[in-house]
Image (tube, rainbow, N blue to C red):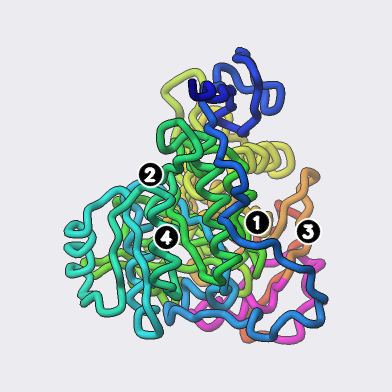
Amino acid sequence: MPPRPKTSFVCQQCGFQSPKWTGRCPSCEGWNTFVEERVVAPPKGRSGLGRAPRAPIALGDVPADAEERLATGIAEFDRVLGGGIVQGSCVLLGGDPGIGKSSLLMQASAALAEKGTVLYVSGEESAAQVKLRARRFGIGGDGILLLAETDLGSIIEAIRRVRPIFVVIDSIQTMNSDAIASAAGGVSQLRECAARLLELAKGDDVPIFLVGHVTKEGAVAGPRVLEHIVDAVLYLEGERFHAFRILRATKNRFGSTDEVGVFEMGDNGLREVQNPSEVFLEERGRGVAGSVVVPTVEGTRPLLVEVQALVTPTSFGLPRRTVTGTDPQRLLLLLAVLAKRAGLNSGSHDVYVNLVGGLRIREPAADLGLAVAVASALRDRPADPRTVFVGELGLGGELRRVQRLAVRLKEAERLGFERAVVPAASLADLNGTGLEVQGAASLREALERAGVADR
């Protein structure tokens, strides 16, 4: 009689394993997150992928070609990766359904197919469906091999037989391993499949990209251990019904996580946006109350973004605060500072804030621009359309200095702006600029320079 498969209970949120079911996870404290999964022990004598153990090697003896990167030719894509694809890396790409994950990797596959064989593994679409998408993008398919398969063992065998220079797994949630007796997409299946693909990538020195589903909160579906296993985690963001897409990295062992890539979705796939600032500002209205331009920095790239605010009297007892593109909690803090330090009370008004173009800003340097936009909308007085605003706002109403101010102002000057309001402490960091730079020590002083303070 064959041995009974081993049963364990795994938390769907954090991957914590328990010998018995429990209502609350002791690791992540989530309720009703445990699912039962059966684990089939691998045959005796099997170790990983059946490869002999490796011997240690001195750091100085590592071959120089281990540092080389594989450039895709898509500049925005390579920028986020840190200059190209590292050989033997395993990268996870997540994003909302229909955002363009498969399209981006198909275009990258087409670019790399000119350098060698590319293997595109599809677990969600048939080979004919993938071909239809490639034809719509104008991709001929020379050098791209398609494999419609979900069995991990067959995929690993195909990778070793073909020996491609680039592999796409679309998606990791559809893959299943014979070593785990559970449905595809489960916690144990995701962990097992990702670990074996990572071992294959390192052992055979082939870069593997995994497409991952996301939850309704926007995080990659599955246990957090999935993000710890891979070398890099990329997110493709943006509104599905808007053209712009933002590619950013939340983890990158081979580069910075501050860089972003900007794309525009078109009929022929994703198109690189070489000058995002001009695109974000091309439909900006002049002389509109609540519209302010903020110079931000994403990685090494300066971006000018329009911040729009709308403040209207509320019809309910509790005013609404609707925010798109920035932290809602940060906006509540700025509203409190505006009320306490500048006398602009919005307690009886609904406040709506939107960052044009689908970009998301988290840096504190945008505080002054957000505050000026809300004050302009509340007073119904347009701020100077030729002025940019940058500065971090403290709880005492003071303006604090920001980093890389010269790069921000240079981008603003290039796009035709004439004036900038910055923290007074940052004036010493400027060596010279073509803009008229005005320093402000407090929020009230900055609002006066913007022309939206009390008269």
Mark 3 vs mark 2: which is more N-terminal? Answer: 2
Q: Residue type at mark 1?
A: Glu
| Residue 405 image offset from top left, x and y in percent | 70, 73
Q: Where 430 falls versus 265 (above or below)?
A: below
**In the image, what residue occupies the spot 54% across and 23% down?**
3
Mark 3 vs mark 1: which is more N-terminal? Answer: 1
- Please tell me whether mark 2 sits on a helix, a strand or a loop: helix
Q: Which residue is mark 4?
A: 157
- Per the model, the C-alpha gap separating discs 3 and 2 is 49 Å
Foreground label between 1 and 4: 4
Q: Which residue is mark 1?
A: 363
Magenta stretch in the rendered image: 404-432
- Per the model, the C-alpha gap separating discs 4 and 3 is 57 Å
153 with respect to 134 (left or right): right
**In the image, what residue occupies the spot 70% across and 61% down?**
53
**10 Å neighbourhood of mark 3: few (<14), some, or many (≥20)?**
many
Q: Residue type at mark 2?
A: Thr
**In the image, what residue occupies the spot 29% across and 51% down?**
241
Q: Are marks 1 and 4 in contact (CB under 8 Å)?
A: no
Mark 1 vs mark 4: which is more N-terminal? Answer: 4
Q: Which residue is mark 2?
A: 174
| Residue 138 image offset from top left, x and y in percent | 20, 75
**10 Å neighbourhood of mark 2: few (<14), some, or many (≥20)?**
many
Mark 4 vs mark 3: which is more N-terminal? Answer: 4
Foreground label between 3 and 2: 2
